Amino acid sequence: MAHLEVQPRKRNPAWLWLIIGLIIIAAILFFLMRSSNNRQQDVITTTDTVSTTGNAAPAADTPGAQP
């Protein structure tokens, strides 16, 4: 009988590289979304409302005003 040396096959752990790549992509997306949310929170808008009563005279620059 012949003597055959059997060496274990070296596997390339493709699934390991796939998981590492997905984790890196998720981390990049997390930091991008996190930084864009901070910019939106810094914007402060205010609205001014003006109310007039029925006895107020029209402003001088409106078409119905007389000199």
Image: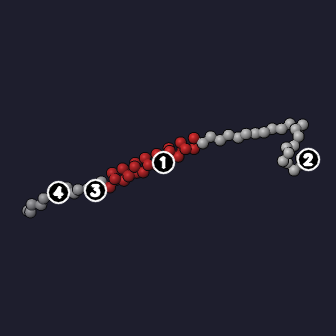
x and y, in percent, of residue 32 in the image: 48, 48
Instruction: Confirm or deny contact between disc 1 and disc 3 (CB under 8 A).
Output: no
Name the residue at 44% across, 49% down.
28
Label located before the other in sequence (2 or 3): 3
Name the colouring of the figure. Answer: secondary structure
Residue type at numbered disc 3: Asn
Mark found first going from the N terminus, 2 or 1: 1
* Kind of residue sitting beneath label 1: Leu
The residue singled out by tag 3 in the image is 12
Label 4 crowd bin: few (<14), some (14–19), many (20+), radius 10 Å: few
Labelled disc at residue 32: 1
Toward the right, the furthest residue is 66
Instruction: Name the front one of labels 2 and 3.
Output: 2
The CA distance from mark 2 to mark 1 is 58 Å
Q: Which of marks 2 and 4 precedes in the sequence?
A: 4
Drawn side of residue 10 relative to residue 59, left or right: left
Tell me the mark number nearer the camera, choosing from 4 and 2. 2
What residue do we see at 9% from left, 60% from top? 3
How far apart are the alpha carbons under marks 1 and 4?
Answer: 47 Å
Name the residue tied to disc 4: 7
Q: Could you tell whether 56 is left or right of 43 in the image? A: right
Q: CA distance from mark 4 to mark 2?
A: 104 Å
Looking at the image, which is closer to me, 6 or 62?
62
Between the C-alphas of marks 2 and 3, the distance is: 88 Å
The residue depicted at 89 percent of the width and 48 percent of the height is 64
For the point 38% across and 52% down, the residue is 21
Q: Quadrant of residue 37?
A: top right
Name the spot of residue 20 as percent of width and height, x first: 36, 50
Please give the residue where the numbered disc 2 appears in the rendered image. 66
**Looking at the image, do the residues carrying marks 2 and 1 touch, with CB atoms under 8 Å apart?**
no
Nearest to N terminus: mark 1 or mark 3: 3
Dot 2 falls on a residue whose secondary structure is loop
